[in-house]
Amino acid sequence: MRAPRPLAAQLLTFAVIGVINTATYYGLYLLLLAVVPYLAAHLVAFALSMTGSFFLNARFTYRTRPTLRKFLLFPLGNATNFLITTAGVYVVVDVLHQGHRLAPLLVSGVAVPVTFLVSRTIMSPGPR
């Protein structure tokens, strides 16, 4: 792969891929709502979009080879995002009694900075 990119370029690329990932997640979430409850739709859409995010970030953000080890660690890096979005969707829908269609969008950005830092550590170990 090419040389590592400066932090600002990584952040920008990460953000663009995040938008793509969020759109993919939300589209899948809406499609799945037709056949499964909202939490199941969230879980499946999250897993599928996270897989795509791994490969896009490996290639474009961190310019690193997508190894099995990194692939297996990448979800751990998204654990904070997963917990915050899952809890957030639950709180918005079942506690605040707001719509389940917009709930993921309301909570999706909360964990992004932490997700970037953890995924950066996993994907491009070494000095920054």
Image: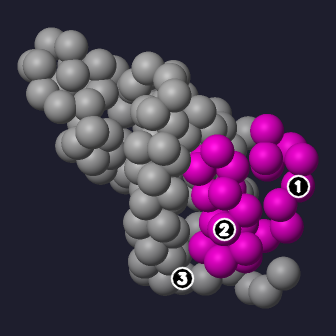
| Gap in angstroms between the C-alphas marked 1 and 3 | 22 Å
**Snapshot quadrant of residue 3:** bottom right
Q: What number of labels is visible?
A: 3
Mark 3 or mark 2: which comes first in sequence? 3
* Residue 11 in sight in this render: no
Point out which mark residue 67 bears. Answer: 1
Q: Nearer the viewer, mark 1 or mark 2?
A: 2
Separation of residues labelled 3 and 2 (CA atoms): 17 Å
Check disc 1: other Cα within 10 Å, few if <14, some if 14-19, many if 20+. Answer: few
Pick whichever of labels 1 and 3 is earlier in the sequence. Answer: 3
**Residue 51 belongs to the span the image colors magenta:** yes
Q: Tell me the quarter of the image containing the N terminus.
A: bottom right
Queried whether the magenta region covers residue 123, the answer comes back as no
Which mark lies nearer to you, 3 or 2? Answer: 2
Which residue: 65% across, 77% down? 60
Q: Secondary structure at mark 2?
A: helix
Of 25 and 108, the residue lying toward us: 25
Q: Amino acid at mark 3?
A: Pro
* Disc number for residue 56: 2
Give the residue furthest to the front.
Answer: 34
Q: Which mark is residue 6?
A: 3
Q: Residue at x 48, y 67 (%)?
A: 20
